[in-house]
Amino acid sequence: DPVDFAKCPNCFDVMVVDAPCSGSGLFRRDADAMKHWSEEAVNHCSLRQRRIVADTWRALKKGGLLIYTTCSFSPAEDEEVIDWMHDNFEGEGLPLQIPEAWGIVKSTSGKHKHECYRFYPDKLKGEGLFLAVFKKTGDDSLQEFTTKKSGFHTKQAVPVAELEKAWIAADDDLRYYKNKETLYAMPSNTLQLFFELKEKLHIRKAGICLGEWLRNGLQPDHALAMSNLLHADLPVVQVDLQQALQYLRKDVIHINENQNGWFLVDYNGMHLGWLKNLGNRINNYYPKEWRLRT
């Protein structure tokens, strides 16, 4: 729940509040959104949006940025919420430099003239969206969020030498941690903060998932293939457009490689994921929930 963030005062440099809304920005895409829209829903969402902002505000550092967005076009959920923020919190609007060619429409809140941005589906590629940025200037007296000094033995039971020999480019600023059999990497200056936040918040994702360390070594995660941590000597197989599409559909693709083991699939300089050559067959490790269906 957003109120849980109050346990972390003055902690974050940037927060994104993608607030639940009445959904009028989705009318073009989703006919059901029109059926469920009502003025009552707008009013209900406006109150809920204010509660979410109020509950999370103290977790933002002084000087930090709150990015507020909805997929609604109702002023009660957009500009009026921004004016309410000005009335209740110490902060200032932050204008953005947006190229005119993008088709984003500027608006201003009625009371405090805060510059806001509306994304209309007929003017750009995408769905309806509202966005505004608020810079926190007050609440400097709040207790700072601090981390314990004891530290964590994050390299215990983590095969660092093996990882940096074959999979990861060595980096003195990188730290590893293990959750059951899954390995993760994170910059050293955020790892301690992660462990502290983990005690207070439900964290969906943190760091880069490297994969599972099994008896025969690392079974790499797709996130590692998408990262900039990769060892320069990792085996790479180059594919053409047809093979790339086959791979992204999670079909079997054939490669001209005699070497067994893991390969990074690369199309035109873009990493797509992993495959494993077992000699008698090739396994495609593209995430099945992401596969192309057409």
Image: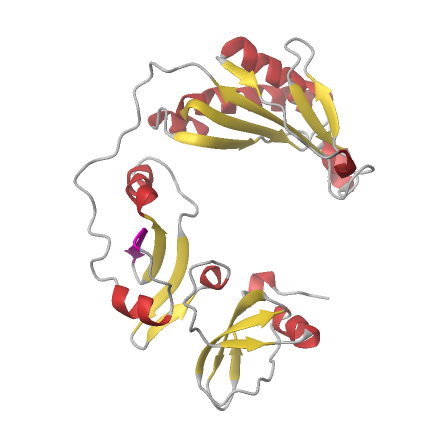
Q: Residue at x 35, y 70 (%)?
A: 218
Q: Is residue 170 above or below residue 264?
A: above
**Residue 269 image-quadrant placement:** bottom right
Residue 134 % position (x, y): 55, 22
What stretch of residues is rendered in magenta?
172-179
Say whether residue 263 is left or right of residue 171.
Answer: right
Location of residue 165 with respect to 202 vertically, above or below? below
Q: Is residue 158 found left or right of 251 in the rendered image?
A: left
Seen from the viewer's position, the closer of residues 170 and 85 is 170
177 is within the stretch colored magenta: yes
The spot of residue 40 in percent (x, y) is: 69, 21
**Residue 104, horizontal then vertical, whole percent:** 74, 32
**Toward the viewer: 101 or 198?**
101
Any part of residue 159 in sight: no
- Of helix, strand and loop, which mostly describes the magenta segment? strand
Give the vertical position of 181 relative to 68 (above or below): below
Q: Quadrant of residue 29?
A: top right
Q: Is 263 within the magenta?
A: no
Quadrant containing the N terminus is top left
The reply to whether residue 95 is in sight is: yes
Of residue 282 and residue 228, the one placed in the foreground of this image is 228
Q: Nearer the viewer, residue 14 or 212?
A: 14
